[in-house]
């Protein structure tokens, strides 16, 4: 990070006045030259007086100075230096004591300095009272008096540096917009988009759930637009109003209209900000009439649902982006605890803000707890958001003082059937499709759309979703209803059916589609499993798990896979084929995690039950797993015998995919025994079957082992090609295959004397395997291959370099590793290595 001034710091912001107009006047080439010269002059002036450039965006600069006199001298030199040229900049200077974080400065003083600069005109330097107090009294500073800035703060005393006549400052006048406790944090995109919409349209409605920051955004949009409305910008607050017929009377009182409102408006050019209209939505026709009368009047409305009148343009206010949410949290937390720790708690703060759905109200209420709770303690208490976030603000309407009150207000505006549907939808975790909502909740698209309109439900990516803070409230209402178990049972029925439809499609031509669908519904499937278990319906809980475990395995979630299987297996002891399928999953998960004793127990149980039931597929699967276990224990002859025994059983069961698996396993066994010709023949046979049944996972697995076979036969180019092909196939949704691809590519690189590349890939393979909970050296063959790889790397790297390259591979994201691993083998390692 740059060495930024700390303690008392003076901030300086610059901005070019009329840059667009100047571009048209000068032309693109001349303007570009003028811009370069302008930057040179500014940076030279600022640098000469100790200024440190903090940021630059477009044609604007943000500079920090260790002293106030230095900042003003730099500003004067900058204005003088630009005088001969066509560009004029406005400059704002303000002094404060900001917090310095890894990202730069954090605090209100930064926002204030920017606002002071934005109030001026080209060639003008505006100075705050705080800065004025730190410089000599005889400095040429003209007193401009008090002005309200567009950050909606209290009036600020401003001064002008040097001579010059300028138009009135661009500050707030002709308005009743209230002073705010702090500047708007984030929302720059929304501010631009909503502001543009307001310039183009006469009625703009900001919609969103309670606590999403509609009012604060609307106030800032209105403040930014003050210069466009010579007859003022006026806030009409409806907080205490209950009768829709009185809305226009409130408008009249706000404007000071005597007699007929329409006559008062006449040809006035003004903006009315009408706040919190959702409980008075029946007044919409009156507002339409008002617009029809005052041809230069514009309306900016905030509501939890649209007005649905002609000419309305709705702008949905979404929760804050995570980085903006963290900024808001830090700013509000430091207001109550100046020593609130940030530097070492960034990830915790991101988690807090994510769990609060990025809702500004929830974040502000949580930040108020920073006075007595550490970031970790606050995060740990967020399991019950609505209870924790009950600290009241006395300067807002009662319904907005707590998060619960805000949601209750929206809930109270629903009619009876809408309230029932709202509670039923709480059975879904992570949202649902239209089909699921209609099936489970016995509802219609129109009813769902009504909740979307009222900002209690969101529609995105073909799914209906609730913010978790809102869903928590809905769960409470569901729990209080007499038929709560009816809806939870319907939910479980629906997702059990989905799991059963998914099971045969988790391999084959539609694998990617079904993996993605089950990924999307993962939380719902888990909720259904947990409900069935709690309800004592162990058989159906086991049925769901038996259908889904392959999804968890393919995605590399072996720990979760074992947990689901072991929990549901312990919930029932019925001797069924479903239990056999679940036992097969349990033994496979244990095998992949290297838990051989537990794997043997589950395999034995599988064989006994499958034979009792005369379930051929189950017998074959258990015997195949005995082969895998034998191989892991180093007995390849026994392993090959088990694979050969299971193969005809799978053929009898009609499972072509498992036939493919058995042939593959026989090929691997030949590979491990050093019979490369037989290995190649069997692996290619398995690959052909995998391609014919379009099982991407089996294709990828066959390519890995064919690559290793080529490697051990000395065909490094073929080995590299096959391993890269497997890796490319695995990139999208076969994460469990990736560590073996990387380890194989590391071995190829070691054999090619590309030691840096090989060590990097091996480190990345180890890190991913640890993350997935699998072992890369479970089989004796894998251990020998790793030893061979390490030995090859040590021929070209000393221990320090080897350790550094391994650590580098471990430190990269999966995306970075894949991009690197898929590059060509022939390039020089130093060119291929990703940057640290």
Image (cartoon, grey):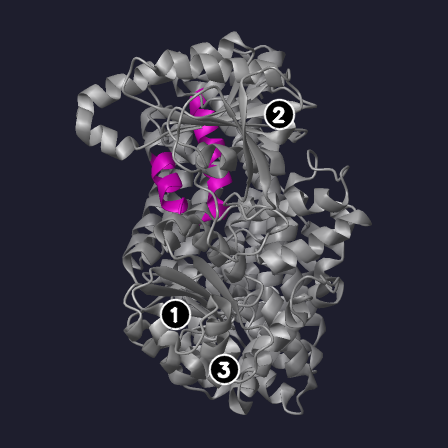
Tell me the number on the disc at residue 654.
1
Q: CA distance from mark 2 to mark 3?
A: 48 Å
Element type where label 1 sits in the image: loop
Tell me the number on the disc at residue 131.
2
Residue 246 percent across, percent down from the top left: 50, 82
Taking the image as shown, residue 401 lies to the left or right of residue 632, namely right
Taking the image as shown, residue 564 lies to the left or right of residue 113, namely right
Q: Quadrant of residue 77?
A: top left
Category of crowding for the residue at label 2, using alpha-carbon neighbours closer than 10 angstroms: few (below 14), some (14–19), many (at least 20): many
Q: Main secondary structure of the magenta part?
A: helix
Q: CA distance from mark 3 to mark 1?
A: 75 Å
- Magenta region, residue range: 722-749
Q: Which residue is mark 3?
A: 246
Q: Nearer the viewer, mark 3 or mark 1?
A: 3
Q: Residue at x 42, y 52 (%)?
A: 190
Q: Residue at x 54, y 10 (%)?
A: 49
Among the two numbered marks 2 and 3 on one chain, the one whose residue lies closer to the N terminus: 2
Among the two numbered marks 2 and 1 on one chain, the one whose residue lies closer to the N terminus: 2
Furthest residue in direction front, as rendered: 258
Closer to the camera, 697 or 687?
Answer: 697
């Amino acid at each position: 990070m740059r060495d930024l001034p700390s303690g008392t710091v003076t901030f300086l912001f610059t901005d070019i006045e009329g840059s667009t107009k100047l571009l048209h006047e000068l032309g693109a080439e001349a303007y570009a030259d003028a811009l370069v010269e302008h930057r040179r002059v500014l940076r030279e002036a600022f640098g000469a007086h100790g200024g440190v450039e903090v940021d630059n965006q477009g044609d604007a600069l943000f500079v920090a100075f260790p002293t106030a006199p230095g900042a003003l001298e730099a500003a004067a030199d900058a204005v003088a230096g630009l005088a001969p040229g066509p560009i004029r900049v406005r400059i704002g200077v303000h002094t404060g004591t900001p917090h310095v974080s890894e990202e730069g400065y954090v605090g209100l003083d930064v926002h204030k300095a920017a606002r002071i600069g934005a109030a001026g005109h080209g060639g003008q330097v505006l100075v705050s009272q705080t800065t004025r107090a730190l410089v000599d009294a005889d400095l040429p500073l003209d007193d401009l008096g008090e002005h309200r800035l567009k950050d909606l703060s209290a009036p600020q005393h401003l001064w002008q540096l040097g001579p010059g006549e300028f138009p009135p400052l661009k500050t707030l006048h002709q308005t009743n917009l209230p002073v705010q406790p702090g500047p708007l944090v984030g929302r720059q995109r929304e501010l631009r988009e909503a502001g543009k919409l307001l310039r183009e349209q006469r009625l703009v409605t900001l919609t969103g759930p309670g606590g999403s920051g509609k009012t604060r955004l609307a106030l800032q949009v209105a403040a930014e637009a003050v210069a466009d409305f010579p007859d003022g910008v006026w806030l009409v607050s409806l907080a205490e109003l209950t009768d829709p017929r009185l809305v226009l009377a409130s408008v009249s009182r706000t404007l000071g209209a005597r007699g007929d409102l329409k006559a008062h408006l006449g040809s006035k050019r003004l903006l009315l900000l009408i706040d919190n209209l959702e409980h008075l939505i029946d007044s919409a026709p009156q507002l339409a009439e008002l617009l029809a009368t005052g041809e230069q009047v514009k309306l900016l409305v905030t509501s939890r649902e649209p007005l649905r009148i002609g000419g309305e343009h709705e702008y949905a206010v979404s929760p804050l982006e995570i980085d903006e949410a963290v900024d808001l949290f830090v700013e509000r937390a430091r207001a109550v605890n100046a020593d609130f720790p940030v530097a070492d708690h960034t990830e915790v703060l991101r988690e807090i803000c994510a769990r609060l759905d990025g809702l500004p109200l929830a974040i502000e209420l949580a930040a108020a707890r920073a006075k007595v709770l550490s970031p970790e303690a606050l995060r740990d208490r967020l399991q019950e958001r609505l209870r924790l976030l009950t600290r009241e603000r006395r300067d807002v309407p009662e319904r907005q003082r707590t998060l619960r009150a805000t949601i209750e207000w929206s809930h109270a505006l629903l009619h009876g059937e809408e309230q029932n549907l709202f509670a039923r939808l709480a059975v879904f975790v992570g949202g649902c499709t239209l089909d699921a909502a209609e099936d489970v909740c016995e509802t219609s698209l129109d009813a769902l759309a009504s909740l979307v309109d009222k900002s209690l439900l969101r529609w995105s990516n073909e799914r209906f979703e609730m913010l978790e803070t809102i869903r928590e409230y809905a769960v409470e209402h569901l729990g209080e209803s007499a038929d709560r178990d009816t809806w939870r049972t319907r939910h479980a029925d629906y997702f059990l059916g989905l799991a059963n439809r998914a099971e045969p499609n988790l391999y084959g031509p539609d694998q990617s589609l079904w993996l993605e669908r089950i990924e999307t519904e993962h939380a719902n499937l888990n909720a259904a499993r947990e409900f069935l278990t709690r309800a004592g319906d162990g058989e159906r809980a086991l049925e769901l798990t038996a259908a889904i475990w392959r999804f968890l395995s393919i995605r590399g979630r072996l720990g979760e896979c074992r947990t689901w299987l072991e929990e549901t297996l312990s919930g029932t002891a019925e001797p069924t084929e479903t239990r056999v399928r679940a036992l097969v999953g349990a033994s496979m998960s244990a095998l992949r995690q290297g838990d051989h004793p537990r794997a043997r127990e589950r395999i034995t149980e599988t064989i006994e039950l499958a034979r009792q039931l005369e379930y051929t597929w189950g017998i074959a699967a258990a015997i195949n797993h005995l082969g895998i276990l034998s191989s892991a224990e180093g007995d390849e002859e026994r392993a090959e015998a088990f694979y050969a025994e299971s193969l005809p059983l799978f053929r009898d069961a009609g499972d072509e995919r498992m036939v493919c698996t058995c042939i593959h396993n026989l090929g691997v066994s030949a590979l491990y025994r050093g019979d490369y010709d037989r290995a190649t023949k069997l692996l290619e046979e398995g690959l052909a079957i995998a391609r014919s049944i379009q099982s991407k996972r089996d294709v990828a697995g066959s390519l890995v082992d064919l690559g290793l076979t080529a490697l051990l036969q000395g065909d490094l180019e073929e080995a590299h090609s096959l391993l890269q092909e497997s890796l490319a196939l695995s990139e999208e949704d076969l994460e469990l295959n990736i560590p073996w691809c990387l380890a194989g590519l590391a071995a190829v690189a070691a054999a090619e004397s590309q030691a840096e590349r090989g060590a990097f890939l091996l480190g990345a393979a180890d890190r991913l395997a640890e993350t997935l909970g699998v072992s890369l050296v479970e089989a004796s063959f894998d251990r020998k291959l790793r030893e061979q790889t390490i030995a090859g790397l040590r021929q070209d790297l000393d221990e320090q370099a080897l350790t550094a390259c391994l650590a580098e591979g471990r430190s990269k994201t999966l995306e970075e590793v894949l991009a690197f691993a898929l590059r060509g083998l022939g390039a020089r390692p130093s060119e291929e290595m990703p940057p640290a």
